Amino acid sequence: MGASYSPSSRRKPFSRRTVLILLLCTIVILFFLANSDSSYNLLPLSLNLFHRSSRSYFHLLVPTTTADLNLCRLLYSAAVLNYPTPILVGWNATGEYDISTSSIAKITGTIRYLESLPPERNDDLVLIVDGSDVWLQLRPDVLISRYFDVNAAAEERLAEDFGEGVMELENIRQTILFGPDKFCWPADYNRPACWAIPQSTVGKWALGPHTDSGGSMNRARWLNSGTIMGNVKDLLELFKGTMVMMSREYDEEAEDVVRQSDQMYLADLWGTQEWVRTEIWRNLTDIWGRRELFNENRQPPPPNGDATYPEWEDGQKTEFHIGVDYESAVFQTAAGYEAWLGWTHYDYYNPITKTLSSSKKSKSSNKRRIKSTAGKFYLPDDIGNSPAPFPAGFRPQDATRSDKQASGKELQTWSGLPLGTNMATKQIFAVFHFTVTGGKDMIDWWWSRMWYVPYGMELLYAAVRETNRERKPITRGRIDGRVWWNAEGEDEVQKPWTQKGGVWSDMGAWLGWEDMCQIHEEEMFA
């Protein structure tokens, strides 16, 4: 950090012969993809060649040390939506794993957990969320499907810049997804993490005529480390790379909130990745005879002459497959979006009448977007096809809403439920990260609007009872060519029988709901 930019790249430019060979390979690959009969496989080639198993597991990690009200709200949402039993990273930890003294311990604790998994779990997916300010809204099958959709769309944009041949040669992919932010933090806009990053894919006028004029009018473009999702292997490399970045940047003179920030080091790692990608792209345009410095996908020029540029050594790993969920299909970060968030009831979903474009790209994005016609709003395809929100046979007795007398059929559909929606991007988000400055009143108000809250402990009892009764996949079919199961599979230790569920610590201790959250039940459903 702090070095001035030199036009001479540290990377050797490709020869014209190499580029011609890569272009020919790309044409051949695209020909075979275009003529493939596979209707379910919407992913780029690079994500589909090497699946070792048709069965994979999904893990939920929550770095935290405190069982407060908002952690219990997260645990409740995970239980009623049939997410994996959460694993609390850093629970009762000391020293370098103590999150209460440094958020960097989130990284060291997560590394310890990921390293404990056997090699055959490298392709498993892991969701990592902050324990103090995150709730879940949609079932894990929707989350997993959207994770692959968003990454597939990102790789299509990368292919436009580099071509698939160069992507394979340079190992440029997107497999790790972070939540988006409207603000770069720590707020030093000369840092590469703030300027050397791609433009947002949110529409240029999505927030009205003053879009990108600053503050809450910015399109979400920056990385927020409170919500992360990726496969075991790549996440482990990411967090180890972050520790290397921290060892180089750690400043004893900086404020604790900056010096101990996991987000700063993760974002700086992303900024370096994107600048190296831009250097590769510049070399390609030079070989193609049209030297360019920037394009719409890469990033705008630095903000001023004081901008700092990343430094890296020959042979140093800089590609970590990082991306951001700009449009909040998976992760909704609330800060700056308060005016564009709404909880909306959607009309009945009928899969027979759905209409989708025949192109693979349209199928990948349209199935998660809100549809509207004649003044009605319809559920996106992926939510409409998701397992019912309530357990089979669930009949609420104590629900506070007027729909407590709803028929059994109505309780087996997502239509009619209030679902949190980003009105600017037209996405019903799967995970809600309420990073706001509005205080407890706003958080409590948002919590009261989550679709499951009116059904209180009755829904928790029913969900845990169903989980205890039968272990089954969390996806109805294959996603990315695999059937997905929660991480406590048949071959893992069975959790103790309980009416209310609970969590595991990352050291293997069982923590029951009664011990963690019973004290907060009255306030949760007041």
Image: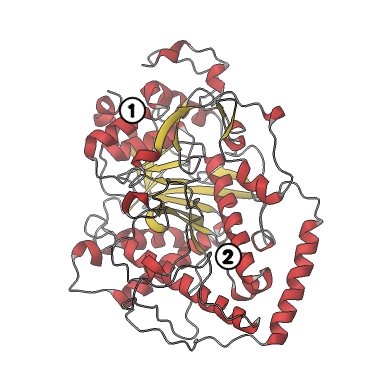
Residue placed under numbered mark 2 in the picture:
173
Q: Position of residue 112 (x, y in %)?
A: 39, 61
Q: Residues within 10 Å of mark 1 (few under 14, many from 20)?
A: some
Residue at image x 22%, y 40%? 439
Identify which residue, 62 or 141, lies in the foreground: 141
How far is the residue under mark 2 from the one under mark 1? 39 Å
Q: Residue furthest front?
A: 209
Q: Horizontally, is 392 left or right of 253 in the view?
A: right
Judge whether 346 appears above or below 507 on screen.
Answer: above
Question: Earlier along the polypeptide chain: callout 2 or callout 1?
Answer: 2
Question: Residue 75 falls in which quadrant of the image?
Answer: top left
Q: Horizontally, is 70 left or right of 430 in the view?
A: left
Q: Position of residue 359 (x, y in %)?
A: 72, 49
The residue type indicated by label 1 comes to Ser
Q: Where is the C terminus found, in terms of image quarters?
A: top left
Q: Position of residue 486 (x, y in %)?
A: 53, 43
Label 2: element kind: loop
Residue at image x 48%, y 86%? 314
Q: Position of residue 498 (x, y in %)?
A: 40, 30
Q: Residues within 10 Å of mark 2 (few under 14, many from 20)?
A: many
The residue type indicated by label 2 comes to Arg
Residue placed under numbered mark 1 in the picture:
448
